[in-house]
Amino acid sequence: MATPVNESKQGAVPTKTGQNRPVVCVFCGAASGTSPAHLSAARSLAQAFHDNGISLVYGGGTVGIMGEVAKTLVSLSGPSAVHGIIPEALLKYERKGRENGDESTPEKLIDENVYGRTTVVKDMHTRKQMMAREVMDSGPGGGFVALSGGYGTLEELMEVVTWNQLGIHARGIVVYNVEGYWTGLLQWVKKSVEEGFVGKTNANIMVEATTSEEVVERLRDYQNAEGRFKLNWGEK
């Protein structure tokens, strides 16, 4: 588990109205999935972000759902709306020779004009800390969203759920349930409540959405669970 990152307002980027721009961290797969609905949902989510002035921070990949949501938002809002954060060990998967190819620095392997700004970090923990910090420093409506994905997506999702329960952050967490992909996880939460492993007042830390418009609405209207722990983590 990465070192906790407390909420702050340092480094937030103001909009033209003076209010900090919302940043949403999207967890999702580096694969496209067997159903075209998964890539379609990624494109739809990017459109919703563009329509609502939301910036994206994500894992920095150019393939699968990750690449689709990033390049779609860049095509709509420009490179400044997207920040990918990728561990150096994963860069070999980005050496595809498509839009990439400039190897003068690790960051330039991924074309900023196609996928947005890229930051290369040393490990997975640093990546997750940086993504979380951008969300916490952003304006109202920022939060975390899980599109379809595999082990890594699930791990990242459950970590920010745990952080919310522990009082480390107070941002919304939305599961974008495409064609029932996350239904099993949502049923597991209900079962955990029934079996006494998750408190009833913490059952709604992560909320479901089935359309991109609902994702934005759930983030904007998110209410923190009553059972969250009121712990003081301090600044390290």
Image (cartoon, helix red, strand yellow):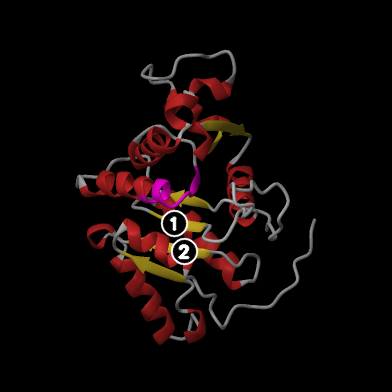
Q: How far across and how far down the image is residue 48, in percent?
A: 37, 51
How many residues crowd around disc 1 within 10 Å: few (fewer than 14), some, or many (20 or more)?
Answer: many
Identify the mark at residue 219; answer none if there is no mark.
Answer: 2
Secondary structure found at label 1: strand
Residue 235 is one of the magenta-drawn residues: no
Split into 4 quadrants, where in the image is the C terminus?
Answer: bottom right
Query: What's the distance in space between the residues labelled 2 and 1, CA to CA?
Result: 9 Å
Q: Which residue is mark 1?
A: 145
Q: Looking at the image, which residue is at 71% across and 58% down?
A: 8
Residue sitting farthest toward the left: 35
Q: How far across and how far down the image is residue 212, in percent?
A: 33, 56
Split into 4 quadrants, where in the image is the N terminus?
Answer: bottom right
Q: Quick one: 192 or 60, which is closer to the camera? A: 60
* Mark 1: amino acid: Val
Which one is in front in this view, the residue at disc 2 or the one at disc 1? 2
Residue 214 vs 107, above or below: the answer is below
- Horizontally, residue 79 falls left or right of residue 62, namely right
How many residues crowd around disc 2 within 10 Å: few (fewer than 14), some, or many (20 or more)?
Answer: many
Residue 235 vs 227, above or below: the answer is above
Q: How far across and how far down the image is residue 156, in percent?
A: 50, 54
Q: Quadrant of residue 69?
A: top left
Magenta part of the chain: 48-58
